[in-house]
Image (cartoon, grey):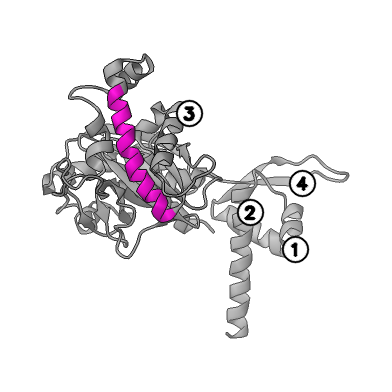
Amino acid sequence: MTRNEEALDIKHTNYRNIYRLFFQYNGLSKPQIVKLLNLSLPTVSNNIGELEAEGKIREGGFFQPQGGRPAIAYRLIEDAFITIGVEIQKKNIRCAALNLQGNILDQKDTALYFENAPQYIESLCNIINIFIQTLSYSSRQILGIGFSIQGIVNKDGQSMLYSRVLPGEHFDVKELQPYFDIPVKLFHDVKCAALTELWFSEQIDNAVYISISEHLGGAIIINNQIDLGKKGYSGALEHLQIHSEGNLCYCGQRGCLETYCSLSALLSPNETIEAFFKALRNKDELVLMRWDAFLEHLAKGLNTVYLLLERDIILGGEIAFYLIPEDLKILQEKILKLSTFPLEGDFIRIATQQKYTSAIGAALPFLIEYLP
């Protein structure tokens, strides 16, 4: 490395480190940055000026003086750049815009029945572009658009590997990108939800995330990262076979966990999840029997998962909002009865993030890539 290259590298590192501080602190003065990073005041001042000129930070009041003149407080412009997440569901789509802290700026649900056809792609992209227009941000400020879909996605986010719930032959970045002048990627919906939980929680290191909504899905968290496996199939717990001659799954196999422990399996036709849990809490005898059978099957699947990975289990998805500690206690007891080894302490918890998790998680990868 030449001297010029070394100097540029140091300059870039200082810039990145200073910018990173604004994601950690609500406000900073130049003297504080000098102390935190052990840099000279001229170096800090030059970088502050550059960040201001680029619209990434701004002056935001003063700090109380400790004797002498009050120091100017500089603060992160949280929406200097934003990301867009789009959750694809069977009957509608959900668009969410996030700021640089991962918080929702705006979100909108729009009815749109999924079709495996080019016409659907056109309608979908038109809805997203209208949503973006209402935000009043330039395309330069939008880091990317992430699509969360009920299917396994290639690790590069460019195409679908497997999708029987929502067949996706036409769901490909090559089909989507022409409608946008912003980068586009695809993501598996459950991995998006797990990423949202990981982003907002300080308690996770290694865990298994189980999403129970209309369909069941899983994601494995290792060292604070969503594990994708070799191609992207990692965590597909929905197709863990718990009964060799059991219910027929949409994948073509029998006895998959999906066919016993999804909301599609739990709820009766035309029954809402709200109605089910209201009856459950009111001790309806038939509902109690259905719930017990559901937990028995779930315990069987989770016992296998825990034996293989020995990681805490996080229950997310639509069901998470309705779960109470007593449900977890019963589930853990059922797992303990099946477990080969003695298990100590609580190892199942309810996800902390329960709203818009897939849409948020679809937007987060662009934000994570941007962060200094």
Mark in the foreground, 4 or 1: 1
Residue located farthest toward the bottom when viewing the structure as drawn? 2
At label 1, counting other C-alpha atoms closer than 10 Å, the crowd grade (few under 14, some 14-19, many 20 or more) is: few
Residue at 29% x, 23% y is 289
Residue 243 location in percent, x, y?
22, 45
Magenta span: 289-309
Residue 120 location in percent, x, y?
15, 43
Pointers 2 and 1 in contact (CB under 8 A)? no
Q: Secondary structure at mark 3?
A: helix
Q: Is residue 166 something one can see in this rendering?
A: no
Residue at 32% x, 35% y is 296
The residue where tag 1 is placed is: 38
Pointers 4 and 2 in contact (CB under 8 A)? no
- In this picture, is 13 found above or below 221? below
Locate the C terminus by quadrant. Answer: bottom right
The residue where tag 4 is placed is: 71
Q: Amino acid at mark 3?
A: Pro
Residue 89 location in percent, x, y?
24, 38
Residue 49 among magenta residues = no
C-alpha separation, residue under disc 3 versus residue under disc 2: 38 Å
Residue at 19% x, 50% y is 163
Q: Secondary structure at mark 1?
A: loop
Residue 37 location in percent, x, y?
71, 61
Q: Which mark is residue 21?
A: 2
Residue at 24% x, 37% y is 260
Pointer 4 or 3: first along the chain: 4
Q: Which mark is residue 325?
A: 3
Question: Which SS does the magenta portion mostly show?
Answer: helix
Pointers 4 and 1 in contact (CB under 8 A)? no
- In this picture, is 87 found above or below 178? above
